[in-house]
Image: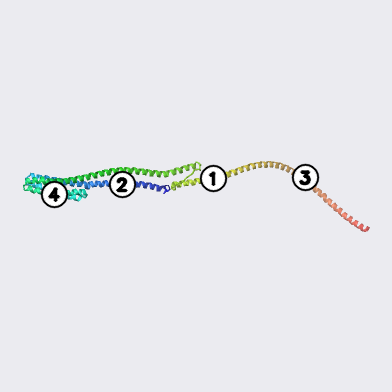
Amino acid sequence: MNLSNLNIAKRLAIGFGIVGVLLLGSQIFAINMVSRVSAGTAELAERSIPNTNATSAVLAEINDVAVALRNMMLDADPADRQKQLDEIESSRRTSQEKLAELNKRLTKPDTRAILERMLAANEKYVQGQQELIKRIEAGDEQGARDFLKTVLRPALAELKGAVNDQIALQQKMATTRAEEAHATEQSTRLMMIVLSLVSLAIAALVAWWNTRSITRPLARALDVANTVAAGDLTSRIEVTGRDETGMLLQALKSMNENLVRTVTTVRSGTDTIGTAAAEVAAGSLDLSSRTEQQASSLEETASSMEELTSTVKQNADNARQANTLAEAASNVAERGGRVIGDVVGTMDQINTSAGKIADIIG
């Protein structure tokens, strides 16, 4: 698909669409990374820290029990021993509650394995507590001391070891989560910067391409218009697109071609008119010459007419005189006619007389 054939609105839509997709992609990436950071933080807040606190609470209760057992061995007062027993029972219940909580919360294999050790060691330690309390209450101080050293302390050490391992594991997991969250935050920041720069570069490239695809044909159209306005119709206009600017260039090309045809027609008409004007000028010169000749002839004719008029006048006078003479001649002829008639009559009479004479002679 030739993008130059797309209209400006579609090109702008594509450009803004690309920018929008980049922004949307950046936002989706940012949301995903924030979700990862949030998940890590939630893991810390909802699992690692509560698990660590619960395990630490178990350790605290174990220590409280150990202190209470030691106090029972040191203090023979029944009331004080009962107080210590109450504290041991309270700490034991709290420890059992925390262990039950951990049993529900811990799901990973490594934490479950340590929890199993904790439960087994705690059961063993509770049984040892009961045995030590029995010996203390029975007054077997030496047996209680021996049992404390040989049985209960190793059981307590085993339980504390498991609890400390669980605490260490939870702290390690919390540290890992914190480091992952920090690394995610750092990578998110870096990636957002990179995405922002890439998006900015692509947006700038799209804007440059859109601007160039619009301004270059417009500049070409402006050059053509200025060239035509200056009277130069020899511009070669190439139309490469079918967008609005391409249609504008096509219109300018058609206008230029029409102007060329019009100018050619006008020039041809002008040449014809020039030729006719030259012929008219030559005719005018000839007519002027003829007019001068006619004027000279008219002057001669006028002079002749004057002479003719004088002659006509003379002829008229002569005609009148001739007419008078004619009338006189007519009168003479009339009289002559009558005389001739008389002569003819006389001749007829003579002829008749001659005939008669001939008849007489003959």
Label 3, on which residue?
318
Depth check: give the residue in front, 348 or 219.
219
Which residue type does callout 4 highlight?
Answer: Lys
The disc label shown at residue 29, or none: 2
Of tags 1 and 2, the one toward the viewer is 2
State the separation of the CA atoms marked 1 and 2.
67 Å
State the separation of the CA atoms marked 4 and 3.
192 Å
Q: Is residue 178 left or right of 263 when viewed as pictured? A: left
Residue 165: image quadrant is top left
For marks 2 and 4 on the same chain, the one whose residue lies earlier in the sequence? 2
State the separation of the CA atoms marked 2 and 4.
52 Å
Of tags 1 and 4, the one toward the viewer is 4
* Residue at the (40%, 44%) spot, across then down: 209
- Secondary structure of the residue carrying tag 4 is helix
State the separation of the CA atoms marked 1 and 4.
118 Å
- Local packing at callout 3 (Cα closer than 10 Å; few below 14, some 14-19, many 20+) is few
Which residue type does callout 2 highlight?
Answer: Phe
Of tags 4 and 3, the one toward the viewer is 4
Label 1, on which residue?
264
Which residue type does callout 1 highlight?
Answer: Thr
Label 4, on which residue?
124
For marks 3 and 1 on the same chain, the one whose residue lies earlier in the sequence? 1
* Residue at the (49%, 42%) spot, across then down: 227
Residue 172 image point, x, y percent:
22, 44
- Local packing at callout 1 (Cα closer than 10 Å; few below 14, some 14-19, many 20+) is few
Depth check: give the residue in front, 30 or 181.
181
Which residue type does callout 3 highlight?
Answer: Asn
For marks 1 and 4 on the same chain, the one whose residue lies earlier in the sequence? 4
- Secondary structure of the residue carrying tag 3 is helix
Residue 64 image point, x, y percent:
13, 45
For marks 1 and 2 on the same chain, the one whose residue lies earlier in the sequence? 2
